[in-house]
Image (cartoon, rainbow, N blue to C red):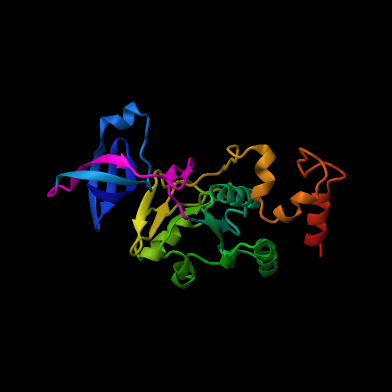
Amino acid sequence: MLKGIIIHASSNLYQVEANKKIYACLVRGKFKKEKMTPLVGDFVEFTITDEIKKEGVIENLLPRKNVLKRPKMANLTQLILVVSMNMPKPDLLLLDKQLAFSEYLKIKSLICFNKIDLAEENQIQEIKEIYEKIGYPVILTNATEKSQAQKLYPFLKNQITALAGNSGVGKSTFINAIFENSLTQEGNISIKNERGKNTTTSVTLYSYGEDSYIADTPGFSTFEITEIPKEDLAHYFIEFVPYLDKCEFAGCTHTKEEQCRSKKSCNRKNNK
């Protein structure tokens, strides 16, 4: 059997890349019986049924490092969190949720503030410094300029990377710039409400050098972290972790409690 990676899924047909070839594969009946659903990003073992037509059958799923439910993917090693500085406006609450969920899944994060040509310099630097101070790498880009998109290149090698963010922030534009052609349809922005119109409807992995893949994923306007138990949530905001042992209250949520020492210590440091 050959080993490969699922780069696209549509109904019950899976595109599997192996040895720089792409095979259209079905799955064995045992997957349905065992209620297993292969995902884009899954490493699999498969047999070739027709080499000329590049067809095969997936026999086994290899162990997963992680699973993302929205978008449905497996084995991500990196998330590039794309935030538009304007058109649409930056959604920092969504960004914070994504960062916490990345920590929960043990996926490293890179923050990309895009469309910097549409925002004031002082606004850009203020937001950038907040996240750099926490400890996340931040890059500033204007994805419509190829030289700007190239800032992502050093971060892509030997990674399975997904670009995440609201529709219209520039994810597909980045992918097109990286591959120097229109692999994906670039979304249009609704001027009326400044929200992106989702154009990507399924997850696809694009090969970028050896052992390197970039995912084009559906844009999403919500990102819930309900999988994380509420009592554990504070552990996944990395700027908060050093202060957790300073709280004297069992079951403290570190939000409304007036005598929460963790909250007070964190606030003092951030206000310096």
Residue at image position (12%, 49%) is: 52
Q: Is residue 206 magenta?
A: no
Q: Quadrant of the C terminus?
A: bottom right
Which one is in front, 221 or 59? Answer: 59
Q: Residue at x 78, y 40 (%)?
A: 252
Q: Position of residue 86 (x, y in %)?
A: 60, 58
Q: Residue at x 60, y 37 (%)?
A: 226
- Image coordinates of residue 40 in percent, x first then y, are 37, 45
Instruction: Give the side of residue 258 with respect to residue 90, left or right.
Output: right
Observer able to see residue 183: no
Q: Tell me what residue is drawn at x 28 percent, y 48 percent.
A: 16
Relative to 250, 225 lies left or right = left
Which of the pair 46/181 is nearer the observer?
46
User: Up-down: is 190 above or below 251?
Assistant: below
Magenta highlight on residue 73: yes
Q: Which residues are magenta?
A: 51-77
Determine if residue 154 is in view.
Answer: yes
Foreground residue, 4 or 182?
4
Horizontal side, residue 111 vs residue 244: left or right: left
> In the figure, residue 139 lies in which quadrant?
bottom right
